Amino acid sequence: MKITDISVDRLRLPLDPPLHAAWDPRPREHFDATVVRVRTDEGITGIGSGDTMTGFDAVRHLFVGTDPLRIDRHVKAIETANFHGGAFWPLEAALWDVIGKATGVPVSVLFGGAADALPAYASTAELKPPAERVESALAARQAGFRAMKIRIAPDGVEEGIATVAAARDALGPDFDIMVDLNQSWRMAGDTADAVDFATTARTVRRLAEIGVSWVEEPLPYHDLAGFRALRARYPEVRIAAGEMQHSVPDLLRYLEQDVLDVYQMDVVLAVGMHRARTIAELARLKHRHFTPHSWTNGIGLLANLHVAAGVGGGPHFEFPYDPPGWTPRRRDFLLARPVEVRADGAVAVPQVPGLGVELDENVIADTKIGGIP
């Protein structure tokens, strides 16, 4: 089998009303998505998405004409291209889609086949006052979720903790609550300093007293000593991070120094599917969790789901969900059908060869703003 062509479509969905993402200084008035298609001489087309693939045309020749099944070679080639400024992990997802279709099995089976579904948590986006967040949490439970992640702003800690406490009181002890402090990395142009360690430690202590399942991204990625100190001081709450950690050696250092309880590398933004699987397996061998970040679109969500289900990730799978600002239909606008959570609160792995992506070609045509033909 040979790759005959790789195309990239760039899409843009207007957002009205805008999404006020807690980690973004500006309201999001549109949602961009990139669709990568790997075509082969045997009629199989693989589909991927995630990062923007900016600059890919300069390295496309490294892949066209090669065997798509040689995934180890392709991962190494993507890494060399990424070193020079790219972020081409959506191509790897498309290649795994080809491999799954060629072998006739879901990609999760190729990654180990540990599970056919994973418990999902509603991963919220916006900052909301206590009463409004409680209402949304009760609605999420009604929709099937058994867990939710709540955002706390660095300049709104008191209201954030009050929101988490109100949600805990309303939902009881059997509903898991996670908290994201969004302090490990920054959006482009956001030059604000991270909250200092002492303040963060007090916040983690108060959240531990409420009984949250984990505190996510409490510190910048480079503060390994701080992460270890939080874990040592508050063993009753998990510390989670790593969603945008692009360095495999740094992730290995995290494992060697036992920095985190939950590893969250996004397979279409951070380190790719193959490398994420390696880190996830090592984390599980150390009795730590792998729960990938999945804040892209339905294709990126499915790629992360296949890896997580393949290796037995958990304790929950991230499911971006915060109506009305963020819904499966908005998130998955480029798919024929959005990925949904089952009534039991789990998200199922599509039981078809490959990733299980079915595009809505009409929507793609209507929202396309550019790309590489």
Image (cartoon, rainbow, N blue to C red):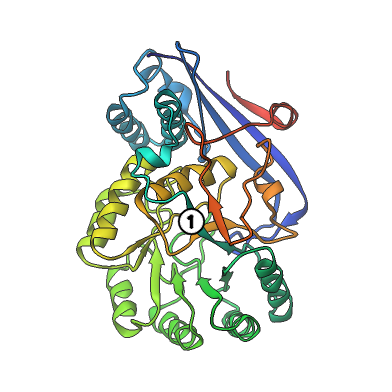
The residue at which mark 1 appears reads as: 118
Q: Amino acid at mark 1?
A: Leu
Residue 31 lies in what quarter of the image?
top right
Q: Which residue is most to the right?
A: 16
Q: Nearer the viewer, residue 300 or 175?
A: 175
**On-image quarter of the C terminus:** top right
Identified at 59% across, 43% down, the residue is 298
Question: Quarter of the image containing the N terminus?
Answer: top left
Which element is circle 1 on?
strand
Q: What residue sits 64% from the left and 26% below the top?
A: 370
Q: Residue furthest left?
A: 256
User: Residue at image x 38%, y 47%?
Assistant: 310
Front residue of 7 and 219: 7
Question: Looking at the picture, how far across and down is residue 80, in whole percent?
Answer: 30, 32
Asked whether 246 or 357 is in front, the reply is 357
User: Dot 1, crowdedness within 10 Å: few (<14), some or many (≥20)?
Assistant: many
Give the x, y percent position of residue 238. 39, 74
Q: On the picture, is 53 further left or further right than 236?
A: right
- Give how far across and how far down residue 94 sits, in percent: 47, 30
Which quarter of the figure has residue 139?
bottom right
- x then y, percent, for residue 38: 48, 22
| Vertical side of 131 occupied by 178: above or below | above
Please give left or right for residue 44 compared with residue 324 in the image. left
Q: Is residue 249 above or below residue 102?
A: below
Left or right: where does residue 11 sit relative to residue 299?
Answer: right
Residue sitting at 41 percent across and 16 percent down? Answer: 64
Inspect this view and state whether residue 250 appears: no
Is the residue 188 above or below the residue 162 in the image? above
